[in-house]
Amino acid sequence: VEFDTINILDMINAYGEEDVRKRISEFSCPINPEIEHFVFENAVEFAKKKMSITHFAINSKGKIVALFTLTHKSIEIGNRDFSKSKIRKLSRYAAINTETEGYRTSAFLIAQFGKNYAVEDGRSISGNELMELTFEILKKVQHEVGGGIVYLECEDKPELLGFYQNEHNGFIRFGERYSEEDNKKYIQLFNFL
Ligand SMILES: CC(C)(COP(=O)(O)OP(=O)(O)OC[C@H]1O[C@@H](n2cnc3c(N)ncnc32)[C@H](O)[C@@H]1OP(=O)(O)O)[C@@H](O)C(=O)NCCC(=O)NCCS
């Protein structure tokens, strides 16, 4: 891949918070205002408090072309008709909740994921490439601490569901969550690292 990733905390250490905030202010994602709101209002604060860490994909000119935000959380994957091999793998990382028959596990969460639509110079990144960069980071974390499940929540839109479940990305639907806060339904998808 022709893009590098940089951790927001490393970026702050290297260039200072003011410079990072300035670079962030050039981020634009009109198709998903929630991501914009997160990067402008929360990304720096949440990283400093270690609540979630944002990573930027940058091009050869050092411009931010996309971002993803990672953290981890406990989830329950309802017992659905997954293949035998998926069940076997799930059982490796999860424990059955005897009351609900679901799989309880802690998982890495891709809390934000999106491209910077303000980038014009050079070729922009594809969603699939951004997912590869995300998995690169997650595999480094896995190498250090173990764990094997990653999940995310996305709006109930065919474009997004198609993207995450495509052959390259391979996420699997396992549930949904209604957010009172956003007044929106989110579809939950997981994958193995
Ligand atoms: C999700 C994403 C990384 C996928 O990248 P990609 O595979 O390179 O695909 P594209 O950006 O070309 O998008 C594919 C199609 O989905 C549509 N799409 C992407 N995000 C969308 C969204 N949030 N809502 C509605 N449609 C969306 C695009 O408009 C495009 O439609 P088109 O083919 O008719 O032009 C990228 O579309 C993106 O950054 N979207 C905005 C941020 C976002 O919504 N992230 C998901 C949060 S769960």
Image (tube, helix red, strand yellow):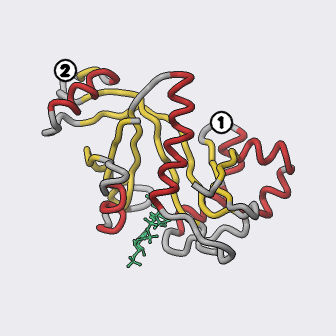
Quadrant where the C terminus sits is top left
Label 2 lies in ligand 1 vicinity (Cβ under 8 Å): no
Report the residue at 36% width, 34% height from top. Answer: 75
The residue nearer to you, when weighing 4 against 2, is 2
Report the residue at 27% width, 27% height from top. Answer: 89
Q: Secondary structure at mark 1?
A: loop
List x then y, in percent, for residue 28. 62, 71
**Can you tell which mark lies on residue 108?**
none
Q: Which residue is mark 2?
A: 98
The residue nearer to you, when weighing 100 against 145, is 145
Depicted 1 relative to depicted 118: above or below? above
Quadrant field for ligand 1: bottom left
Instruction: Specify whether 102 is left or right of 46.
Output: left
Depicted 112 relative to depicted 13: above or below? below
Three-letter code, disc 2: Thr
Report the residue at 16% width, 36% height from top. Answer: 83
Quadrant where the N terminus sits is bottom right
Direction bottom: furthest residue: 120
The residue nearer to you, when weighing 3 against 55, is 3
**Can you tell which mark lies on residue 50?**
1
Instruction: Specify whether 182 is left or right of 173.
Output: right
Depicted 53 relative to depicted 90: above or below? below
Three-letter code, disc 1: Lys
List x then y, in percent, for residue 3. 63, 56
